[in-house]
């Protein structure tokens, strides 16, 4: 719905690529046809490797109502993509205003409008996209890389040992 609210002139110069598969696929295909946006939406289905999709993308969208810490989100940010996500669960923890846009989960109509506004804003502002992508990549490197996770886990273990919790 949100993609259909992006002006046709911008939609026709872009593509919304849906990667993944699930029970909603046929309903989404019908909706896309009904909304008249088939020419700018591609279904790629389930993929074993999505790295080429990240490399080809200008931005990453994860409009989940509820989400843990999404591996796809972290991967996209590590590839330097700005993110449009929802203020829900893990997404709002990982994505800050420097590396993306988190949209508040409101009514479905308000959410669609805000998502469309985010699409339009980022499509029209490639410099902002680039800065957000760089900041997101830095954030992942600093907070979510294997080295960062190892450091955090070591700190937790040291704290537990220092407090004598294992004695």
Image (cartoon, rainbow, N blue to C red):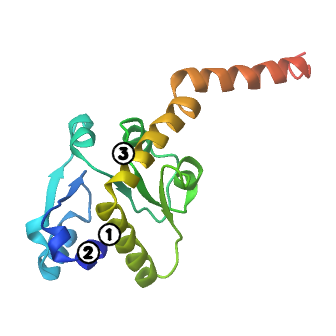
Q: Earlier in the sequence, mark 2 or mark 3?
A: 2
Instruction: State the image coordinates of residue 151 (x, y, percent, origin top left).
Output: 65, 21
Taking the spot 54% from the left edge, 32% from the top edge, the residue there is: 144
Q: Are marks 2 and 1 in contact (CB under 8 Å)?
A: yes
Pointer 1 local density, CA inside 10 Å: few below 14, some 14–19, many at least 20: some
* Extreme residue toward the left, this view: 39
Q: Nearer the viewer, residue 54 or 166?
A: 54
Using the numbered discs, state the Cα–Cα distance from disc 2 to disc 1 in whole angstroms: 6 Å
Q: Nearer the viewer, residue 86 or 96?
A: 96
Q: Quadrant of the C terminus?
A: top right
Q: Earlier in the sequence, mark 3 or mark 1?
A: 3
Q: Which residue is mark 1?
A: 120
Instruction: State the image coordinates of residue 26 (x, y, percent, origin top left).
Output: 17, 67
Q: Are marks 3 and 1 in contact (CB under 8 Å)?
A: no
Quarter of the image holding residue 10?
bottom left
Instruction: State the image coordinates of residue 162 (x, y, percent, origin top left).
Output: 89, 18
Q: Which residue is mark 3?
A: 81
Q: Secondary structure at mark 3?
A: loop
Using the numbered discs, state the Cα–Cα distance from disc 3 to disc 1 in whole angstroms: 16 Å
Taking the spot 21% from the left edge, 46% from the top edge, the residue there is: 46
Quarter of the image holding residue 117?
bottom left
Taking the spot 52% from the left edge, 23% from the top edge, the residue there is: 146
Pointer 2 local density, CA inside 10 Å: few below 14, some 14–19, many at least 20: many
Q: Which residue is mark 2?
A: 6
Q: Which mark is residue 21?
A: none
């Amino acid at each position: 719905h949100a993609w259909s609210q992006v002006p046709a002139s911008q939609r026709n110069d872009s593509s919304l690529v849906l990667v993944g598969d699930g029970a909603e696929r046929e309903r989404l295909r019908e909706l896309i046809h009904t909304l008249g946006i088939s020419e700018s939406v591609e279904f790629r289905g389930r993929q074993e490797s999505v790295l080429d999709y990240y490399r080809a993308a200008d931005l990453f969208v994860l409009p989940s109502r509820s989400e843990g810490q999404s591996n796809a989100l972290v991967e996209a940010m590590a590839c330097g993509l700005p993110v449009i996500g929802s203020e829900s669960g893990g997404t709002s923890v990982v994505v800050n205003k420097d590396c993306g846009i988190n949209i508040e989960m409101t009514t479905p109509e308000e959410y669609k409008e805000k998502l469309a506004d985010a699409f339009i804003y980022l499509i029209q502002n490639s410099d902002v996209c680039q800065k957000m992508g760089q900041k997101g990549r830095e954030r992942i490197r600093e907070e979510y890389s294997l080295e960062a996770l190892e450091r955090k886990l070591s700190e937790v273990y040291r704290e537990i040992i220092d407090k004598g919790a294992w004695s």
